[in-house]
Amino acid sequence: MGRNKYPEETVAKILDAALELFCAQGYEGTSIQDIVDRLDGMTKGAIYHHFKSKEEIFNAAFDRAMAPIVERRRATLGAGNMTGAQKLKRLYAPESVVPQIDLWARMHPAADPVKSSRLLAMQYQGSFDESADGYLLPVIEEGIADGSIACACPREAAEAVSLLANLWLLPLFRPLENKGRMLARAQCLAQMAAAVGLDLGNEVLQTTAQIWDVWNRAGW
Amino acid sequence: MGRNKYPEETVAKILDAALELFCAQGYEGTSIQDIVDRLDGMTKGAIYHHFKSKEEIFNAAFDRAMAPIVERRRATLGAGNMTGAQKLKRLYAPESVVPQIDLWARMHPAADPVKSSRLLAMQYQGSFDESADGYLLPVIEEGIADGSIACACPREAAEAVSLLANLWLLPLFRPLENKGRMLARAQCLAQMAAAVGLDLGNEVLQTTAQIWDVWNRAGW
DNA sequence: TCATTAAATACATACTAATGGTATGTATAG
DNA sequence: CTATACATACCATTAGTATGTATTTAATGA
């Protein structure tokens, strides 16, 4: 193909193909050749020119996919005229959660933890790094400081809620029979969160219902 | 090496070596050759005679390691002269938990979720299959039936508590700075569990302290 | 009870296809 | 002319297979 005038388009194509494959087939289940085959006419040389390893492709693909969501959240939480408690509820409101679900749903990840083990591991790590240490804990601490949240163990509460929200409420890696079960999980999670001082808001059930619909939109 | 009179010894040696390597280096990080190299004089032929794939070795190794623990638990829960609530507390008592921790500790798993992603996925799946659907939920339902437990969402509560206990309270895949943090997690978990009707017992903190000691015994 | 033999088992050896990655060549943009 | 954006050809490692060989076990016969 010679040389492209706009290499960033090539990078984008690679990342698009890679993300879809990684989600659908897992990390180990996706070979570089699989990615190459999906990139019409391109060869392995192109990929290894732009990325130095499969791992780097994987990370870049996910970072890119998550970027707009992270940015949006950052913007939301930056607003100064909200209490910590309000921000917390905002984090679990539809407008914050749905875009993320939508992204995942578009990728059709395999509902098999072992096959998706690397994705699961990233979500797991993400639940600590990004959610707990990153933005959830600061919001809780903000709420404690401004008196809107009463939580004895902010760090632990943040980690636990984050883990449950990411790996349990969202049926990314295990199929969930029906909407009812998902709503039950949401209610259960809200109850548990409330027990350690975190009020996720009254609309949790409505948010969850929306999540279910977005997730099962494609009907698979 | 010709032929062994007691092939089950060979199988045991293979599984011992495999388990250690899988825990220490992860599934993908461990090659069949790694296992062979640890089995003095043995070759790949031996391995593929007894097991048909790497996956099968992995599963067999873990099933074997877990067998005595599963059996012990089964025996404990079989006793008819206990209420559901009592059995539940028993499940989180030191004598039930410590042997499992001890096993994990001996294997020195890598405290890196991505590197240990397959182990993590197994723990994740196990939290649903074994704990929630397997024995935890029945115990809770037993408690509901005999009036010793009041829980509105037994299935959800079982899943959530199981997940948190296996993937958060136990620092299998992420290092935990100190004993205090682990105790804080335990207390937080107990509080959350209580909120959905599950009393994990008053000794949770003592159990947790023991877990910490067993886990950090080797000092790494 | 014991030697002989046949068959099944427990490995070792040699090989294959696929994989992640590299080295190098070549054409095009700046 | 030089740096970049690729393509091509190649390599080492990997999981897995095909096959060969030695030894144990079972069957047989006396």
Image (tube, coloured by chain):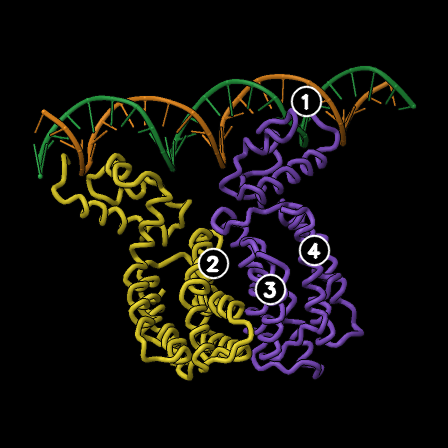
Chain colours: A yellow, B purple, C green, D orange
Amino acid found under the numbered disc labelled 4? Asp
Amino acid found under the numbered disc labelled 2? Tyr
In the image, residue A15 lies at what x, y percent?
Answer: 27, 49
> At 62% from the left edge and 72% from the top edge, which residue is drawn?
B190
Q: Are marks 3 and 2 on the same chain?
A: no
Residue A85: mark = none
Q: Earlier in the sequence, mark 4 or mark 3?
A: 3
The quadrant of the rendering that contains the N terminus of chain B is: top right
Q: Whole-Å distance between the Cαs marked 4 and 3?
A: 17 Å
Q: Which residue is mark 4?
A: B213
Q: Which residue is mark 1?
A: B2
Q: Are marks 2 and 4 on the same chain?
A: no
Quick one: B205 or B65, which is closer to the camera? B205
Point out the frontmost of discs 2 and 4: 4
Q: Are marks 4 and 1 on the same chain?
A: yes
Q: Is residue B108 above or below residue A195?
A: above
What crowding class fits label 2: few (fewer than 14 Cα within 10 Å), some (14-19), or many (20 or more)? many
| Label 1 secondary element | loop
Q: Earlier in the sequence, mark 4 or mark 1?
A: 1
Q: Which residue is mark 3?
A: B165
Q: Which residue is mark 2?
A: A124
Q: Is residue D22 above or below residue A95?
A: above
> Going by the image, does B8 lie left or right of B24?
right
Amino acid found under the numbered disc labelled 3? Ala
Point out the frontmost of discs 4 and 1: 4
Quick one: B62 or C22, which is closer to the camera? C22
Quick one: B46 or D1, which is closer to the camera? D1
